[in-house]
Image: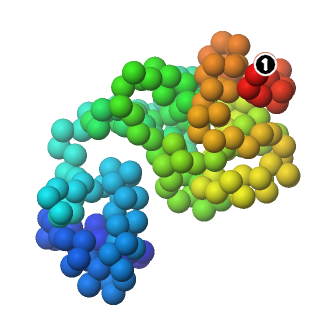
C-alpha cells in the first residue's frame, strides 16, 4: 500500500488531519505530504479546509458514469477511463483520450478538471499536465489515437517506436477538436479514416 492510500485510510478513520501530523506519521517532509495531497485533490479523493485535510465524501456529486462513451457510443471497457469533472460536481467518463478531448469541447465554458492514466504505469495523472502521442500506429480505441504519458521523455520514446507526434494537452486538444475535419462518429471507426500527422501541425 502506497502513502496516498494510507493517507486515505487515515482519513476514513479520523475524517480530518493536518499536514504537519501526516508529516510526523510518515516521517517525511511536509512538502512531500503536500505533493501527495495535490495528487489526491486532483483525483477528487480529498479536499482542504482551514489547514486541515478532509476526505471528500462526494455527497453532492452528480455521477454521469455510464457503460458507453457519450461521444462515440462505444462500450467503456478500460479499467481506468478518461474522466472529467465539471464545476466540481458532474463526473463524466469517455472511452479514450480522443473522445475525452471532444467531451472537453462540450464544456469549454465551464470549470473542468480531468484525470487520465499513464500508458506505461497506469498511474493517475492530471490530463491537463500530461503529454500525448497523437496519431501513432497504436490505435488503442478511436482514431487518430491519443496516448497519454506522465513525462515527455516517455512519450518521445513511444513515438520512436510507433510514430505520431508528441504534444502537450492544449496542442493535442486543438489538434483533435479544431483541426480534424471529420464526423465524430466516423472518427471512431479507424478503417474509415484517412489520417496524416501533418494535419495536426498548427499553422
Rendered position, 131 above or below 90: below
> Residue 153's quadrant in the figure?
bottom right
| Location of residue 149 with respect to 194 vertically, above or below | below
Residue 105: image location, x then y, percent: 50, 22
Q: In the picture provided, is 167 more to the left or to the right than 115?
A: right
User: Residue at position x 30%, y 32% from top?
Assistant: 87
**Can residue 173 be spotted in the picture?**
yes
Left or right: 28 in relation to 167: left
Residue at x-position 41% and y-position 39%: 113
Q: Is residue 63 left or right of residue 55?
A: right
User: Could you say where residue 184 lies in the image, as x and y percent from the top left?
Assistant: 62, 17
Around disc 1, counting alpha carbons within 10 Å, would you say few (fewer than 14), some (14 to 19), or many (20 or more)?
few
Residue at image x 39%, y 34%?
112
Q: Position of residue 187 (x, y in %)?
A: 68, 21
Residue 124 placed where, x, y %?
49, 55
Quadrant housing residue 14: bottom left
Quadrant that contains the N terminus: bottom left
Displayed quadrant of residue 110:
top left
Residue positioned most to the front: 203
Q: Secondary structure at mark 1?
A: helix
Question: In the rendered view of the protein, which quadrant contains the C terminus?
Answer: top right
Q: Which residue is mark 1?
A: 192
The residue under the point 38% across, 51% down is 42
Scheme by which the image is coloured? rainbow
Any part of residue 80 in sight:
no
Amino acid at each position: 500500500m502506497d502513502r496516498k492510500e494510507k493517507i486515505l485510510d487515515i482519513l476514513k478513520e479520523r475524517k480530518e488531519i493536518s499536514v504537519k501530523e501526516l508529516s510526523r506519521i510518515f516521517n517525511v517532509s511536509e512538502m512531500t505530504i503536500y505533493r501527495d495531497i495535490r495528487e489526491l485533490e486532483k483525483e477528487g479523493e480529498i479536499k482542504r479546509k482551514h489547514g486541515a485535510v478532509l476526505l471528500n465524501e462526494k455527497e453532492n456529486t452528480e455521477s454521469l458514469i455510464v457503460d458507453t462513451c457519450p461521444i462515440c457510443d462505444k462500450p467503456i471497457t478500460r479499467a481506468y477511463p478518461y474522466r472529467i469533472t465539471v464545476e466540481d460536481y458532474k463526473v463524466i467518463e469517455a472511452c479514450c483520450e480522443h473522445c475525452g478531448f471532444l467531451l472537453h469541447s462540450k464544456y469549454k465554458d465551464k470549470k473542468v478538471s480531468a484525470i487520465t492514466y499513464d500508458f506505461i504505469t497506469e498511474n493517475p495523472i492530471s490530463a491537463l499536465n500530461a503529454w500525448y502521442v497523437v496519431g501513432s500506429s497504436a490505435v488503442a480505441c478511436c482514431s487518430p489515437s491519443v496516448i497519454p504519458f506522465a513525462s515527455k521523455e516517455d512519450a518521445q520514446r513511444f513515438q520512436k517506436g510507433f510514430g505520431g507526434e508528441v504534444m502537450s494537452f492544449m496542442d493535442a486538444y486543438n489538434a483533435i477538436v479544431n483541426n480534424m475535419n471529420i464526423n465524430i462518429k466516423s472518427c471512431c471507426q479507424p478503417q474509415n479514416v484517412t489520417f496524416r500527422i501533418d494535419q495536426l501541425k498548427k499553422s
